[in-house]
Image: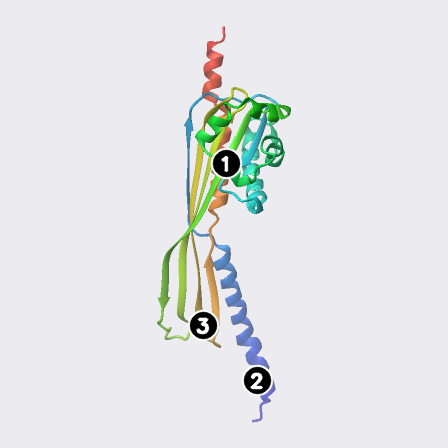
Amino acid sequence: MYTNPQKLSSLWYYVFIVPVRRLLLALLIISLAGGGCTTAWVQERRLAPTGLAPQDAIAIILTAPVKDEHLSELESPVTGCVQSALAQVQADIRIVPGQEFRKLAFPDLTANQIPSGYFAWQRLLREPAFFQKIAPLDLRYVLAVDTEQGRRLTEVKWNAVTSMLSGPGPSLSASWDNEVLLETIVVDAKHRRVAGAVHAYAKGNSGAGLSLVTFPMPLLLPHGMPSFPFGAACRGLGDKLATFLADKNEQQAQAAQMP
């Protein structure tokens, strides 16, 4: 019986090769779409009472160690997180962009030269010239956010065992922790004092690697497990700052003292 080799080859391709390729592609997409484990926490330290009123203006800026070339890509999402959370507690808050604030307050400084930390802002609050510069903004608060991001390798694994069923064979994989810390100094511009600080931290475990698939043909299959701790820290920071600034307990105490 004569069989056309070309037809057999074509049949083999569509019956076996194409489904396997689709399966491998699906596995790759699933591995990349899945997220690694992320943990987060937030905490606050209050030094003075706060509160929000309609039309209060709040400036949000990123300070050291952010460089100018990375400023907009980090400041924009942080501003968005805080603004979204504030809208839940006071809908008509006015947000002053960081660029507008820096242009008036620190016209001659780069992003990593702007005062950073509690003591730097305490010194700045004692300078009348600083308040003269920012007077046109009529600010209630300045939120000065320090950002720190790091990556730490946790494991590198080599598996030289080959499957007896000609499935996944030798593989090389690595995992690491992505860490994000957002520290915010809450500056009460109206009362010329530091009202406190809010810290948000998140850590996510990520991984990537290559595995050798030997059936139906040798193929290197990449796989990964991304994590996005910056988003978790950003959302946590926004939520905590909103409750910190609203200070419901302080407002209730003031209402109770009213005759």
Task: Give the side of residue 1 with respect to residue 31, left or right.
Answer: right
Residue 240 visible in the snapshot: no
Q: CA distance from mark 1 to mark 2?
A: 66 Å
- For marks 1 and 2, give the one nearer the viewer: 1
Please state which amino acid type lies under the numbered disc 1. Val
Please state which amino acid type lies under the numbered disc 3. Val
Residue 127 x %, y %: 53, 24
| Secondary-structure class at tag 1 | strand
* Label 2 vs 3, first from the N-terminus: 2
Are the residues tagged 1 and 2 within 8 Å (C-beta)?
Answer: no
Are the residues tagged 2 and 3 within 8 Å (C-beta)?
Answer: no
Q: Which mark is residue 145?
A: 1
Q: CA distance from mark 3 to mark 1?
A: 47 Å
- For marks 3 and 1, give the one nearer the viewer: 1
Residue at x-position 58% and y-position 93%: 2
Residue 213 x %, y %: 45, 72
Task: Give the side of residue 55 with respect to residue 166, left or right.
Answer: right
Residue 257 x %, y %: 46, 10
Q: Which residue is mark 3?
A: 213
Assign the N terminus to one quadrant of the image.
bottom right
Mark 2: few/some/many CA within 10 Å (<14, 14-19, 20+): few
Compared to 13, does 149 lie above or below? above
Residue at x-position 58% and y-position 90%: 3
Residue 64 x %, y %: 49, 40
Residue at x-position 52% and y-position 43%: 66
Q: CA distance from mark 2 to mark 3?
A: 24 Å
Q: Which residue is mark 2?
A: 8
Closer to the camera, 89 or 27?
89
* Label 1 vs 2, first from the N-terminus: 2
Closer to the camera, 160 or 75?
75
